[in-house]
Amino acid sequence: MNKRLFFAFNVSAPWQEIEPKGRLIDKNLRHMTVLFLGDVMEEKIDQILKSLFIFDKKIGLAGLFDKILFLPKFRANVIAYRMVFFDDIQSINNYRTSLIQLLDRLEISHKDFKSFLPHVTLCRRPFEIREWKKNFEKLPFFISSVHLYESEQNSNYISLWHQDFIAPFEEIEHTADLAFKIRGNNYNELYLNGFIALAFKYSKLCDFFTPLEKVDNLDDVIIALNVLIEKMDIKIGSPFKAVSFQSKLEKKAYLEWEMIVDV
Amino acid sequence: MFNLKKIAPATYVLLKEKAMKVEGLIIANEKLLSDVEMVHPLEQVKNVAHLNGIVGYSIAMPDIHWGYGFPIGGVAAMRIEDGVISPGGVGYDINCGVRLAVVPIMYDEIDDRSRIKLLQTIYNLVPSGVGSGHKERGLSDKDYRDLCTLGAKWSVDRGFGFKRDLEYSESNGCIEGADPSVISSHAMQRGKKQLGSIGSGNHFVEIGKIEEIFDRDIAKSWNLHLGQMYILIHSGSRGLGHQICQDTLNDFIKKGYGENLIDRQLVAAPITSQDGQNYLSAMGSAANYAFNNRQQILHLIREGFKEVLKIDPEKIIQIYDVCHNMAKMEKHEVNGKLETLCVHRKGATRAFGPGSKELSSIFQKTGQPVLVPGDMQRASFILAGLGNPLTWGSCCHGAGRAKSRAQSFKEWKGENLISHMRNLGVNVMAASRGTIAEEMPDAYKDVSDVVAAVEEAKLAKIVGRLKPHLVVKG
């Protein structure tokens, strides 16, 4: 028996509560497809599962949805959001390449897109393009896991194999303010993931994002995040007052910083 | 875990440990002390006791909770000559405070339809929520200079309210020594279009009924009557204050004032240093912005009452305006001598008593009003200060949160909050459902417990209990 398979990264995002009409993909199942295998014989699936390797990033990569896409261009069947990763996308490209090499070795066919366009599909036909265009706003995301999925009818997916990533941020309890654990491999990542945590709370912050050239200490991370908050407050208002100089920083296999935000 | 020794009703001393320069003083009853959320704030009380120049005690009010450096509900007084000024001991929202006014009408005389119309009118007149402000106009540089130095008088001179309002405000609605020339252009930008708006988070306008009078004599002298309608405003210095605090923290940290401190968030400069003086000047400017903010908000509410209930704005009488995030230069007795101290109150209210020279003649007999908002359903309170010297004449400022915003938001997910509150006798409006979810009554401790502890410890005495019915949340 054949199964319809594909590799995808699951994507977490603060999706809008109410989205325009269409055949919506379940918010918990939204993903970025990296490789589509099509129909694969069951005996080949075992071979794939035995040979799979892990993605080499431990902390889920993050970024922004910066544009709405109607695909394919000339007769749109799906609505998607384009993904712009903060990190160099090379790690994902390398992973794709390694998967392609594995499948070639196992003599399993796959659809290798001419150029890889990272995106998440939100909705299938029928939909109203104008409504979706009007509704679009930039959102933050991070990838939470990678899966080998079996695709069933009606956008149902069964995970045959997966690897979970460490979340780049996690909200923690704080009575008066907002508090998060922010994770990263260096201070620049702490800045990016600190920004993502804030943007998950208030996505309009995405419009004010600026990357940092170089940051090598936590104070500068905090000052840079506060510059974003300040810019946003001047322009449209901000639910955050400031990120505090709370500098509880743990060095594990990665850096973990307790970010407290005065609200 | 904490070495507490009871020295008086609802008053505990936290004994000195290690390098604490003074003991801690905790105002709380046993119920409040048993709250597991006391651990972090009491650690912060101990940390504050390490600061240079601290006099008396590092003090915790009964609504204490975890804050930035200082706990919220923390009070600490410093000697001028060798003491420090800490922005964390004031808070980001400089001169966040509360203003109470009363309306010459019984709440129950107004029918439901008029009440709803009043709420909607005030919601439309007074900008609230994230980004709220008056987009069509912004403050000019001259406006800023003037309002930051003149205090609320600037707004009164422009027709927002009455001269009497100033007499019934802490420090007559103006902090001396403000100097806007030390404020950054970023800070000015942030506050430019926000004057006369509530803001977001736990800020609000509340209208309700004076439901119980505990001290008839004081209530009478303050023009408070049982059943009367009241207006309560909670707001502060908006983006201007936040940015001034942030600019100062950035500056102090870079200059190394945070080094060798037990908690870097207590970063503080010597009061007599140029940096310390600059902060005080900037803080004063933000404080005066906040006085103007509440002045203009009350004016807009008065206009709302005129429109809906045809009540003359002049007949809506201000009872008092208090600051609860501030550092003030005050004279207090230290070892038998009168000294000027810099008193930090962060989430704490001044509560000067009868005979206090710093109060105007209006409040010499009664002591000053102390305004303590609770949550949007149970109660707010008005008290009379007793000027307790142990706390430098300070008192609590609110109920204190019992739950985090995230927890409250999660617990109320999917519920019809407006309908739920209406069933409890409260009509609430807000720019976002999320704000209401975070601010539900059970997210807060019971303010009755807090004011009971305050009264037991003789910081203030309860004069009246206020019951909210119409609420605009920020």
Image: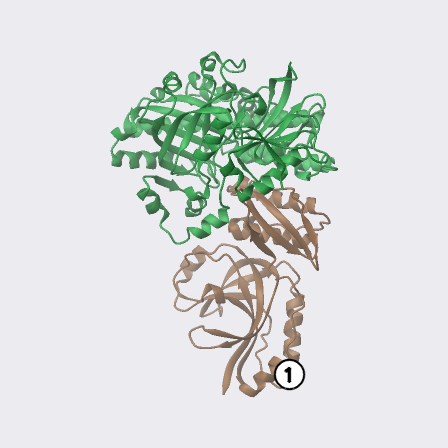
Chain colours: A brown, B green
Residue A225: where, in percent of width, then height? 62, 46
Determine whether the residue tagged by mark 1 lies in a helix, strand or loop. Answer: helix
Residue B296: where, in percent of width, then height? 44, 27
- The local crowd at label 1, few if under 14, some if 14 to 19, many if 20 or more residues have their Cα within 10 Å, is few
Relative to B304, does residue A191 appear above or below in the rendering?
below
Relative to B169, does residue B10 appear above or below in the rendering?
below
Q: Nearer the viewer, residue A203 or A210?
A: A203
Residue B128: where, in percent of width, then height? 43, 38
Name the residue beneath numbered marker 1. Answer: A104
Residue B118 in view of the camera: yes
Three-letter code, disc 1: Asp
Quarter occupied by residue B311? top left
Chain identifier of the residue bearing label 1 in the image? A
Residue at 55% across, 24% down: B148
Residue B383: where, in percent of width, then height? 44, 25
Left-right relation of A51 to B152: right
Residue B440 in view of the camera: no
Q: Quadrant of the C terminus of chain B?
A: top left
The residue most toward the top is B361
Relative to A181, does residue B225 appear above or below in the rendering?
above
Left-right relation of B61 to A223: left
Residue at 67% across, 29% down: B22
Q: How many marks?
A: 1
Q: Nearer the viewer, residue B421 or B402?
A: B402
Quarter occupied by residue B176? top right
Left-right relation of B203 to B180: left
Quarter occupied by residue B1? top right
Q: Nearer the viewer, residue B211 or B23?
A: B23
Relative to B145, does residue B256 appear above or below in the rendering?
below
